[in-house]
């Protein structure tokens, strides 16, 4: 009789423990999802980091190849950023990077993808654009970045930008498309220097 009298209490304790473990597991799953999302986001700029951007670029390449849609990759390098960082400090440089990220995200469509590829390098995947339209968008973004500024004492600090553009239809290889966009950016940088 003692056994049956204690069984319901043991069952209740077991159910309580199972429920507690379910809650812990649910919290662990939520935390893992949060950390996975953060792993792809630049903590300073709140846009995709290189890892997240390359994942989205790979998806975009696969989509373009499968459905023959128009899309382009823009590779942007800031001109004069190192001098701002060296002369005015990293806090000012960080503020300027935030202004650049805001200019980019504020002037592309929600379907486009913006990411920080390195210290002062950004990437944009633009959908439903090709050829001269993609180049025109790159020129417009160069200008917007040049207009972005941060106040520093009596000065307004800004940087220039050089953007190279390639069509995603040129290859399905991630490394090749990034290299082609990088080369296009350097060609644009040489052109801007005259």
Image (cartoon, rainbow, N blue to C red):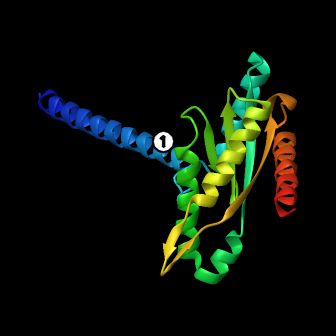
Q: For this rendering, which residue is in front, 25 or 82?
A: 82
Expressed as whole percent of the image width and height from the top left, the position of residue 175 reads 84, 43
Residue 69 image-quadrant placement:
top right
Query: Would you identify the image quadrant in which residue 120 lies?
Result: bottom right
Residue 54 in sight = no
Query: At 75% across and 48% down in the image, what residue appears?
Result: 75
Residue ID at (78%, 34%):
132
Q: Which residue is mark 1?
A: 33
Element type at mark 1 = helix
Q: Residue at x 11, y 30 (%)?
A: 5
- Above or below 15: residue 47: below
Give me the residue at 58% from left, 31% from top: 111
Q: Is residue 159 left or right of residue 7?
A: right
Quadrant where the C terminus sits is: bottom right
Question: Relative to the observer, which residue lies in front, 189 or 68?
Answer: 189
Quarter-of-image position of residue 21? top left
Q: Position of residue 83 (x, y in %)?
A: 69, 77
Picture quarter with the N terminus? top left
Q: How far from the left and from the top, in percent, is residue 114? A: 62, 44
Classify 148 as above or below 58: below
| 85 vs 149: above or below | below
In depth, the one of 131 and 46 nearer the eye is 131
Q: Residue furthest top?
A: 67
Crowding at dot 1, Cα within 10 Å, few <14 / some 14-19 / many 20+, comes out as few
Measuring from the top left, give residue 170's x and y in whole percent: 87, 31
Q: Is residue 172 left or right of residue 28?
A: right
């Amino acid at each position: 009789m003692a056994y049956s009298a204690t069984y319901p209490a043991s069952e209740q304790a077991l159910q309580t423990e199972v429920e507690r473990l379910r809650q812990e597991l649910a919290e662990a799953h939520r935390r893992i999802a949060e950390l996975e999302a953060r792993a792809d986001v630049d903590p300073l700029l709140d846009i995709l980091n290189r890892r997240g951007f390359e994942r989205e670029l790979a998806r975009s390449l696969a989509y373009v190849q499968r459905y023959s849609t128009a899309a382009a990759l823009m590779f942007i390098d800031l001109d004069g950023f190192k001098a701002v960082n060296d002369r005015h400090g990293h806090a000012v440089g960080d503020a300027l990077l935030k202004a650049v990220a805001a200019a980019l995200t504020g002037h592309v469509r929600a379907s486009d993808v913006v990411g920080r590829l390195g210290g002062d390098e950004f990437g944009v995947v633009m959908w439903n654009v090709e050829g001269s339209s993609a180049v025109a968008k790159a020129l417009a973004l160069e200008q917007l970045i040049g207009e972005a500024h941060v106040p520093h004492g009596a000065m307004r600090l800004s940087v220039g930008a050089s953007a190279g553009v390639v069509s995603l239809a040129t290859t399905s290889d991630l490394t090749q498309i990034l290299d082609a966009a990088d080369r296009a950016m350097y060609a644009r940088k040489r052109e801007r220097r005259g």
